[in-house]
Amino acid sequence: MYLKSPFLSEFIAWLKKREEKLYLVGGMVRDYLLGKSSEDCDVVVSKNMGIRSFFLKKGVKFVYYERGDVKTYKLWPERAEIDVCEMRAENIEEDLKKRDFTINAIAYDIEEKRFIDPVGGKEDIEHKRLRMCYKQAFLDDPLRILRLFRLSTEFFLTIDRETLDECEKAIRFLTSVSIERIGEELKKLLFLPSSFTYFPLMERVGLMEKLFPHTNRNLTFYISLDERIKKSNISYEPPLLLSLKVAAFLGEDAKRWSDFYGWGKKVGKWAKLWSENKLLPYKVWNKEESLGKLIVDFGENCLPLSIFSAAYILSQNNIEKESFEQFVKGMFLNYKRWEEKIKVINGWDLINIKPEKRDEILRSLRRKIVDENLNRNDCLRFIT
C-alpha cells in the first residue's frame, strides 16, 4: 500500500538521504486492512531534523501543533491532507505500542513493503475485535473512551472485555477533556448510519450519565429514529441530521446540550422544533389537524418531522403504527406534487388585496389547495 503523492515521494527520498525513515500509520493502514478506502494519511518520521525547512522550500502550507507528547505537522500539498508526526519512542515498534487501539497501531514500511504490527492489530481486525494497546490508554487520554464506541459502531467491532472494564473505570476522568474535543467526537459518532448500536452499552457503563447528566434519555426512540432515517434514503445536510438525532435522544434538553457541546444555534433550533412537534403528523393522520397546515407551516421540513414522528410512534409500540407508516410514506411520495400545487397562484394575483389581510389569506389558501385540491381558478374565486 502507498499513497500516490509526488510530494510524499519527494519527502521519502529526502529522508532516505538523511538516513531517516518514514512509515504510514493509523487510519490509512487500518482501513486498507479492512478493505475500505481512506482519506486519512498519517505518517511517522524517525527524526525531526530540518523537516520544517523542507516544507518551506517546497512551498507547502502547514501548521504545527502539540497534544501531549505528540508533535504533528498538518500539511496540505496537492489538494491532499497529510499529518506528519514525530516518533514518540526510539523505534517504530515502541511508538506503536503507545497508541490507543491495536487496530490503529499498525505501520507500513514503504521502502521495505512490509507491515509492522507489535500489538496484534491485524489479528484483531480479522476477529472484528477492538482492544486497547496498553492498560493506561484511557487514563492518558480519556477522549479515547468516546473513540472506542465510535470505532466499534463504524466498523462493527466487538469491544474486548478487559478494554471495556478499563474504559468504565476511566469514565470519571472524562471531565478533564475539553468540551470542544468531546463535542467533535460525539458529532462523528452521531453522523454514523448505525450510531445507535452501542448507545445502550454506553448507558450501561455510565458514559451517558457523564456526558448528559440529569437528562431523560429515550434509547428506544433513538434506535427507532436511526432506523427510519436509514430506510428513508434521504440525504440530510449535517446540521439537520444532527438535530434529528439529538432531539430524539435528549428530548426537551436538546437545545441546551446543543449549545453546551458547540453544535450551533441552528442544530439547537431545529432540535427544539422536532421535540415540540413530534406528534403533529400523528394528529394530521387522525384528522385532528389538516395536511395543508402541516405542509404550509413546515415546508420541506415536514418530511424529517414525519420521520421523527413515525419513530416516536414506533418506539411507543402504538397499535396503529402500520397505518401511520403508510401516512408517512405518502408524505414522501407526494410532497413534490403538493409543493408544485401550492405555487398555482403568485404575487400578481394578490396585489389588490389589503396588506394586513394578505398573509392570513395566503396561508388559508395554501391549506385549502392541499386539503380540498383547489386549482388556479378555484384559488382566484376564493380571493376575489
Image (cartoon, helix red, strand yellow):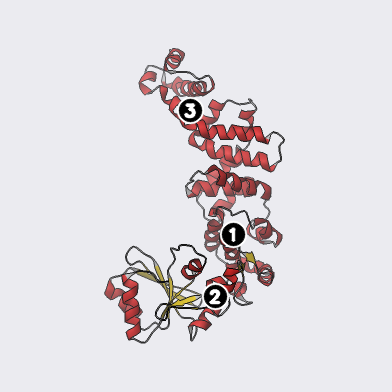
Circle 1 residue: 153
| Disc 1 element | helix
C-beta proximity under 8 Å, tags 3 and 1 = no
| Disc 3 element | helix
The residue that appears at 67% across and 36% down in the rendered structure is 321
Q: Considering only vertical position in the picture, is 235 above or below 329? A: below
* Disc 2: CA contacts within 10 A as few (<14), some (14-19) or many (>=20): some
Calculate the distance from the C-alpha at mark 2 to the C-alpha at mark 1.
20 Å
| Disc 2 element | loop
368 lies left or right of 41:
right
Q: What is the number of the mark on residue 377?
A: none
Where, by quadrant of the figure, is residue 354 drawn?
A: top left
Please name whichever residue, 197 or 182, is drawn nearer the observer in this view of the structure: 197
Circle 3 residue: 338
Q: Considering only vertical position in the picture, is 14 above or below 361? A: below
Please name whichever residue, 342 or 35, is drawn nearer the observer in this view of the structure: 35
**Residue 229 position in % (x across, y down):** 56, 45
**Picture quarter with the C terminus:** top left
Where, by quadrant of the figure, is residue 152 drawn?
A: bottom right
Which circle's residue, 2 or 1, is located before the other in the chain? Answer: 2
12 lies left or right of 129:
left
**Picture quarter with the N terminus:** bottom left
Circle 2 residue: 99
**Residue 253 position in % (x across, y down):** 62, 48
**Residue 289 position in % (x across, y down):** 61, 26
The residue that appears at 62% across and 76% down in the rendered structure is 136
**Residue 21 position in % (x across, y down):** 40, 82
Which one is in front in this view, the residue at disc 2 or the one at disc 1? 1
Inspect the image, locate mark 2, and give the three-letter code of the amino acid beneath it: Arg
* Disc 1: CA contacts within 10 A as few (<14), some (14-19) or many (>=20): many
